[in-house]
Each structure stands twice: as structure tokens, then as C-alpha cells.
Amino acid sequence: MKIDSLESIELEMAIFVRRLTSITADKKFGNIDRSAYLLLHQISTHGCAGVKTLAEIFQLDISTVSRQAASLEQKDYVYRIPDPLDRRAYTFQITDLGKQELEEYKQARSIRLKEVLKEWTEDECETFAQLLKKFNLTINEIRAKEPN
Amino acid sequence: MKIDSLESIELEMAIFVRRLTSITADKKFGNIDRSAYLLLHQISTHGCAGVKTLAEIFQLDISTVSRQAASLEQKDYVYRIPDPLDRRAYTFQITDLGKQELEEYKQARSIRLKEVLKEWTEDECETFAQLLKKFNLTINEIRAKEPN
DNA sequence: CCTTAAAGTTGTATAATACAATAATGTAGT
DNA sequence: ACTACATTATTGTATTATACAACTTTAAGG
């Protein structure tokens, strides 16, 4: 029944988060963490953006993103572009060094992940990827509708 | 190809953790958080255990679990049973109040989750549950093999 | 016994986060 | 054009989850 799956998903999600947090915490691939990874990925694949936009995308407080971005800037992984129309605003663009770090981080994560998924069939991997993506999208849609 | 799935899983996992963290953070279902939930669930379904065991299960530092358990004890969700054979050791058992809170938390999470999975087919839900579980198990096995 | 190991707790540090206060700039109503 | 309000971002402060280190009490092995 769907109810059973629900309860199961609900528990396994909690465990999943715990496990992933544990892995990313103690491995500390390279110089970036998960937040930094997500930010870099975002501006790398979807073009530059300001902290407000980024905060909305990741459901984080603006101040949090501001600090994360500042940290990335300080490491020369991103640079700041003043908005020509609004002198309060900036957008961040990824640097070559940032792209390189991002790629390395991705590689490191993939290697680790490959270890976990070694015994999985190709089909299972594809399905898992697809369902995760779907889940994330769905949450996004719900968030978008909510008042907040 | 499997490689594509890998990269996809790798990215979606990061997003997934971000989303779930965000949800559990701002909702604050009842009086317990994810860690507390996992601890309560563990001792509720697998019997009482000491902090060392729990720490191993969740890949957390003993001190972390010690504090989490103390917090649960303080709220009367668990109580402490001295080990009759080893006067250093305790195990924690869930109280009725703890069971009740756990159940309520589960319900709250399930309701929220149902919202997200509203449009999913039963089959998708089952598969997702199964793959999450498999993933968690696999990580566990890998951890068990590792030196550490 | 004496030394070393083990189970827990408590102190301290760090990192990611939110919320509040602030600064600078933009926008609208009169 | 002036005033009031809104918006963008930063910085200060607090909280929370975590790890590591120091310590206490107890157990186990020579």
C-alpha cells in the first residue's frame, strides 16, 4: 500500500540525510562543502545571480548566502559583478578556478558514490536519479505555491 | 549511461539534503528534531541501547549522542536503565510519552510527505522507498568494512 | 594490585544556519 | 522634489548540531 511506502520513505529519508551529512562532513572533499557546491553549480550552469535569488532557490536566509558567497569570493571561486541598473545589487559569476574546483569536487563525490552504487544495476541508478530529481522538483513547486 | 545517472544522483542528493534540511528546520514538528526522531525510532523498534551503540549506528560522536539522549531524558521521552553487569554503562528505553511524541512526529512528517507525493503513483512511491532503503543499507555495509 | 581500556559526561571549538539591526539605494505618492 | 517606504545586501548575535579533547568511573588483564 501507498501508506506503507510513505512511512518507509519518511524513515529512510531521515536516515539518508544523516548518512549523507556524515559522509560529506568527514570527507571534506577539497576546499568546498555542500553549500558551496550547490552555489557554484547553480551559477555555473544557470548563469550569475545575486544573493537574493540564490537564497530563494535554496530556501536559505539571505544572510547565509551572503556569507557563503563572500567565502567563495574570498577563495577566488566567484567574482562580483555590480548590477548596472541598481547600485545596491551584485551578481556572482564563477571564475575559472571556481569551475576547476567544482569539477574536482564533483569527481571526488562521484568516485565515492560509485563505490556505494557499485552493485546497483544501471536501471536502478537511473530510476533513483529520476525519482530524486522528481522529488526535488515537487518540493520546489510546493514551495513556490506557499505563501511564506 | 550509468555515468550520467551517477552525476545526476550526485547533484540531486545534494539538493535533496538541502531541501529536507530546510523543511525539518523551519517546520519544527512537535518537540523533536530529526536526530531525536532517529534515536527514538531506534530504541523504540530495536530495543534499548547505550550511547556507544547508538553513536555507531548513526555514525555520530559518542558525545553528540550523549547530549541528544540527555535531552530526550530531560523531556521524559526516554529513561535510563543501569546495566546490571557494568556499572559504567546505561541503556535507554523509550517511555510512553516518548512513544506518543514519536508517533505524532511521524504523523506530522507523513502528512507533509503525502503532500509532496500526492501526484506520485503507488509504484513510484514503492520504488523510491525501496531504493532509499537500499542506498542506506549499502552505505552501512561500506562503513562496516572500513577501518575507522 | 597496577596499568590500561572502555563507557559516559562535560568543556570547548567550529560550522551552518536564522533573525535582527543597519547601510545604501531605489520607488511612489503627494 | 521631498518624504516615506521598500529592497538589496552586509554584519552582529544567537542557536544548534556536531567533533574532539579532557576527565571520571568502572572493568579487565597482566
Image (cartoon, coloured by chain):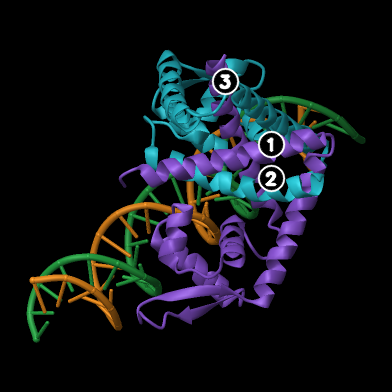
Chain colours: A cyan, B purple, C green, D orange
Crowd rating for badge 3 (residues with CA inside 10 Å; few <14, some 14–19, many 20+): some
Q: Is residue C24 above or below residue A3?
A: above
On screen, residue A67 versus residue A85, left or right, reads left
Q: Is residue B88 above or below residue B30?
A: below
The type of residue carrying mark 1 is Phe
In which quadrant of the rendered view does residue A26 lie? top left
The type of residue carrying mark 3 is Ile
- Image mark 3: chain: A
User: For mark 1, what is the residue?
Assistant: B128
Crowd rating for badge 2 (residues with CA inside 10 Å; few <14, some 14–19, many 20+): many
Closer to the eye: label 1 or 3: 1
- Image mark 2: chain: A
Closer to the eye: label 3 or 2: 2
Q: Are both tags, 3 and 2, on one chain?
A: yes
Query: Could you tell me which secondary element the residue under label 2 belongs to?
Result: helix
In which quadrant of the rendered view does residue A148 lie? top right
The answer to whether mark 1 and mark 2 are in CB contact below 8 A is: yes
Mark 1–mark 3 Cα distance, whole angstroms, equals 29 Å
Rendered residue at 79%/39% (across/down): B117
The type of residue carrying mark 2 is Ile
Where does residue A90 sit, x and y in percent of width and height?
Answer: 58, 23
In the image, A15 versus D20, the foreground residue is A15
User: For mark 2, what is the residue?
Assistant: A9
